[in-house]
Amino acid sequence: MIGKILGVFFGMLFGGPLGALFGLFLGHQFDKARRLNQSGFARGGFGGADQAQRQEEFLNAAYAVMGHVAKAKGQVTPEEIQLATIMMDRMNLNNEQKRAAQEAFRDGKSADFPLERVLDKVRISSGGRHDLLQFFLELQISAAFADGSIHPTEREVLHRIAQGLGFSAQQLEQRLRMQEAAFRFQQGGGNFGGGHYQGGQQGNWQQASSASQLSDAYDVLGISEDADSKAVKRAYRKLMNEHHPDKLMAKGLPPEMMNVAKEKSQEIQNAYDLIKKVKGFK
């Protein structure tokens, strides 16, 4: 509205009635563009001229909180440091970005790290988008699983992170179960024991291993082993929709995190493919 008012005023001042009409048109275009910018920020969080800055804040916050999770049990393990380094490589960070990420990780380990304040900024910079916040939470869960298990103090911090991002305790526990299953699934190669059964003791071991991987595959999708084909497909489509790299990028995920998103979606795909193969549905 303010664009129309100013347009008519200056149009009348400099061009009379015709100028007022032209000013009204320009003012309308100004108001329209202003509304689009405002609504784009409200929907996406990363839209607008400061998109790169917001993505950088999201990235650095992820490493800072990761450092805080790693420090939760008192001492940062070599596995956790290695995970942070591996993630920097997977994200193809340049030297300047790596230095910023390393500094953020160190900041997160400090005793006075303002976790809640950082999480508030993450919610603002992501525009409150559920899938981006979920991606952020899953990064922290992955960090906690770097050494293969979660310490009680790490679990406590993860609950604070989940709450700060707007997730319930129940939602976090489900994600923890899914991530733990994904960790075992990856360790097992993500396949059904090669798809072969052999006789004797080795065959029995492979059958047990395969059954365990199948159970993990169901947990990766967040469903029970007695789920029918419709429930399996529904869970798979929901997770792929939430984790599809292109969709996350369109909603503001930093481009450096694209590879991590691809790996997560591949993990979901592998679990789904295994269930399909074993259960024999298309």
Image (spheres, helix red, strand yellow):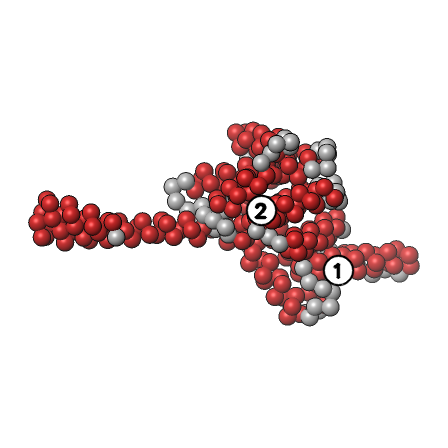
**Relative to residue 188, is residue 221 depicted above or below?**
below
Residue where numbered disc 1 is placed: 214
**Relative to residue 103, is residue 175 depicted above or below?**
below
**Residue sitting at x 69%, y 70%:** 228
Label 1 crowding class (10 Å Cα cut-off): few <14, some 14-19, many 20+? many
How many discs appear? 2
Q: Residue furthest right?
A: 200
Q: Name the amino acid, label 2.
A: Gly
Residue 155 makes an appearance in the image: yes
**Relative to residue 153, is residue 44 depicted above or below?**
below
Q: Left or right of 264: which side holds 279?
A: right
Q: Nearer the viewer, residue 179 or 1?
A: 1
Of the 4 image quadrants, the one containing the C terminus is bottom right
Q: CA distance from mark 1 to mark 2?
A: 34 Å
Residue where numbered disc 2 is placed: 164
Q: Residue furthest left?
A: 16
Residue 239: x and y in percent read 60, 58
Label 2 crowding class (10 Å Cα cut-off): few <14, some 14-19, many 20+? some
Label 2 secondary element: helix
Closer to the eye: label 1 or 2: 2
Q: Left or right of 97: which side holds 30?
A: left
Q: Name the amino acid, label 1.
A: Leu
Q: Residue 226: which disc? A: none
Residue 2: x and y in percent read 25, 49
* Disc on the earlier residue, 1 or 2: 2
Image quadrant where residue 277 sits: bottom right
Label 1 secondary element: helix
Residue 94 makes an appearance in the image: no
Residue 207: x and y in percent read 83, 60
